[in-house]
Amino acid sequence: MLLVLTWSVLLAVGAGLIIHPELGTGVRASSGETPTDFITAVYVGGSSLSIVGASDFAPHTAAMKVMFLFNSVVGTSVISLTLTYLMQIYAALRERNALGLKLHAMFPDGELSGGYNNLSELAGEMAEAKEGHHFYPVLFYFRFREPYYSVSRTTLLALDTVSLIKSALADDKAGWVKKSASVQQLWSGSLMLVSTLDETFLDQAPEGGGDAITAEPWRARYFAALRRLRQAGLPLVADEATGAELYVTLRGRWDPLIAALAPAMGYSMDEIDPARSRPQEAARRAPFQERLRSA
């Protein structure tokens, strides 16, 4: 609303500056004496922003007639385009929020099974979110209080899901899922979105990779996820240690991007990734971690 009001006021003032010297000569009142003050000029200029114009003032020279016509075309075009742009912005914002809420509702308490039934749909919506931010960069600056509406949280869930699919599922029984176009599209779209945001906010994307301190909680979370996936009856990799290392490698590619992006968008990583602040709890929930250490 402030944007539309600003455009309208500036156009009216600009037209008033042109019309002011012509009051009483090139532009006259329909009846009575024509006021020549600047407020009247702004009023005439603002009224001429519409095709209808003001009924009590009219141009009387060719130059002012062209001026009134040009001003009406510019005014209606700018205001219409601004309103249309704002409507498109909020439509794209609603779609982004709907995707965030859908991912949040799909993974209650870290449950990931719901995502496997909707990989293709999620991948398409993530690609739409990426293109929405490409066409409307101003979406970068919309922030909601709930962290599950943020791009950081949405991309974290999507990329963590794909990382688990690639590292935890068995190649012989679930290889087609790992190589499917939906999984690749979800991975590529999410990674491109968070990388674009990092380049926009931070001028450059931080380098990936995880050190020994950050990798240990990632391994603990991987083994905790294995237990949940095993309880769901999904086919898992035989070599859990190798799978854990693959998960750490994959996570090292995107976790630093999200960790750098979240504060720039006004969120703490504890809000975006609550499990990050509970490494000890994650370790206690990973009964296979000692097996990895011994291996």
Image (cartoon, rainbow, N blue to C red):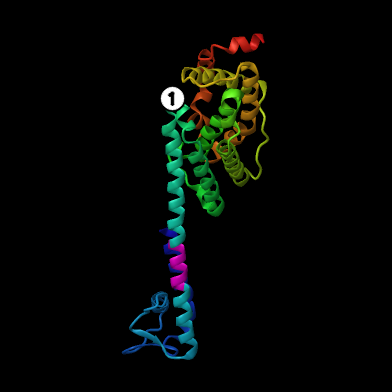
Q: Which SS type dominates the magenta stretch? A: helix
Taking depth in this image into account, of 131 and 267 the one nearest to the observer is 131
Q: Residue 157 at x, y = what percent?
A: 51, 32
Q: Residue 11 at x, y = what percent?
A: 47, 71
Q: Residue furthest left?
A: 31
Q: Residue 201 at x, y = what percent?
A: 59, 45
> What residue appears at the point 55 percent right and 38 percent down from the top-left corner?
182
Q: Identify residue for label 1.
A: 109
Q: 80 above or below 227?
A: below
Viewport quadrant of the C terminus: top right
Give the magenta-colored segment's residue range: 75-83
**Quick check: can you spot residue 146?**
no
Q: 213 above or below 251?
A: above
Q: Residue 252 at x, y = what percent?
A: 64, 29
CA neighbours of label 1 inside 10 A, class few (<14), some (14 to 19), many (20+)? few
- Amino acid at pointer 1: Asp
Taking depth in this image into account, of 295 and 29 the one nearest to the observer is 295
Q: Is residue 175 left or right of residue 34?
A: right
Examine the structure image and report whether residue 143 is included in the region drawn in magenta: no
Examine the structure image and report whether residue 81 is included in the region drawn in magenta: yes
Taking depth in this image into account, of 228 and 143 the one nearest to the observer is 228
